[in-house]
Amino acid sequence: MRDFVKGVRMFGQGLGILLRSPRLLLIGAVPALLTTLLLLGVMVALVYWIGDLTAWLTPFADDWSAGWRTTIRVAAGVAVFGLALTISQIAFSALTLAIGAPFYELIAEKVEDDLGGVPGAVDLPWWQLLGMGLRDGLVLVLRSLMFTIPLFFAGFIPVVGQFVVPVLLALVTAWFLALELVGVSFYRRGMDLKQRRMYLRKRRGLGFGLGLPASLLCLIPLAAIVVMPVAFVGGVLVARETLRDTVAA
């Protein structure tokens, strides 16, 4: 519980750091804005083609009466849209951090320099950061879907779906978001996704304390544009804390 509270506090410290440096907040907001527009376009296209998609998914209903055919296809459309919305929320952070790799590397460098720097920091070109971010982001999204898709369908179970599933879904989302948020700090130390997972598992409370408020606040429309850079700076602090006793920070 102490680490959880510390992780929440570091998320708050991220906001304080960016409020003292509005330029960094603006830099960090740009990738989140671009990702928001991209995913919004995808969701608009899905809504436009949802009729054709549900008809393709339910060919067995072609010969049903109009009432039953409409009912099953509306239900399928709601399920498809809900699943797409869930996946987009999961993919949002990975896309934002990958697209904004050069921006976030600049923020991480500035924040860590103010905190004492990173001895022997690895200077990666932007294209390599982008490639690593896309690769690791895809891995984390696919792993998170192994939990979130079953939980999504479990949400239709009475009682369990209304009380237990939302809590589990929030925890899963928080954990994978935390793994993404600390990524750049680990890259700057020459450490890969496997090492990132290993070290953060030792301080799970920090990860949940960072990821839970960030993921919940991102559910507020357009709030993610500001929440993401704040959470990223919090991730820099969490990474330093996680590595403090093992790697010179």
Image (cartoon, helix red, strand yellow):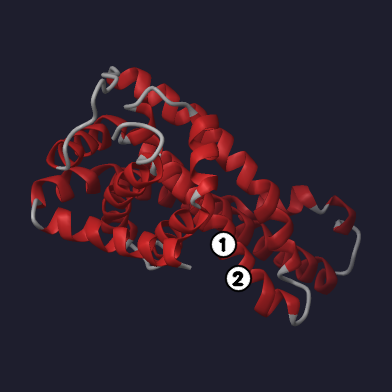
Viewer-closest of 182 and 22? 182
Residue 157 position (above or below residue 85): below
- Kindly identify the residue that appears in the image at 28 percent across and 17 percent down: 125
Residue 106 position (above or below residue 132): below
The image shows residue 41 at horizontal and vertical percentages of 42, 48
Kind of element beneath mark 1: helix
Three-letter residue code for mark 2: Val
Kind of element beneath mark 2: helix
Residue 183 position (above or below residue 89): above
Outermost residue on the bottom side: it is 159
Q: On the image, numbered disc 1 is attached to which residue?
A: 171
Viewer-closest of 122 and 166? 122
**Which of the 4 image quarters holds residue 151?**
bottom right
The image shows residue 207 at horizontal and vertical percentages of 46, 53
Q: Is residue 48 visible?
A: no
**Mark 2: few, some, or many residues within 10 Å (few <14, many ≥20)?**
few
The image shows residue 225 at horizontal and vertical percentages of 29, 55
Question: Looking at the image, how many numbered discs can be counted on the residues?
Answer: 2
Q: On the image, numbered disc 2 is attached to which residue?
A: 167
**Mark 1: few, some, or many residues within 10 Å (few <14, many ≥20)?**
some
Three-letter residue code for mark 1: Leu
110 displayed left or right of 190? left
The image shows residue 34 at horizontal and vertical percentages of 31, 43
Viewer-closest of 137 and 185? 185
Asked if the residue under mark 2 is in contact with the one under mark 1, i.e. CB atoms within 8 Å, the reply is yes
In the rendered structure, find residue 100 and report the number of the disc placed on it.
Answer: none
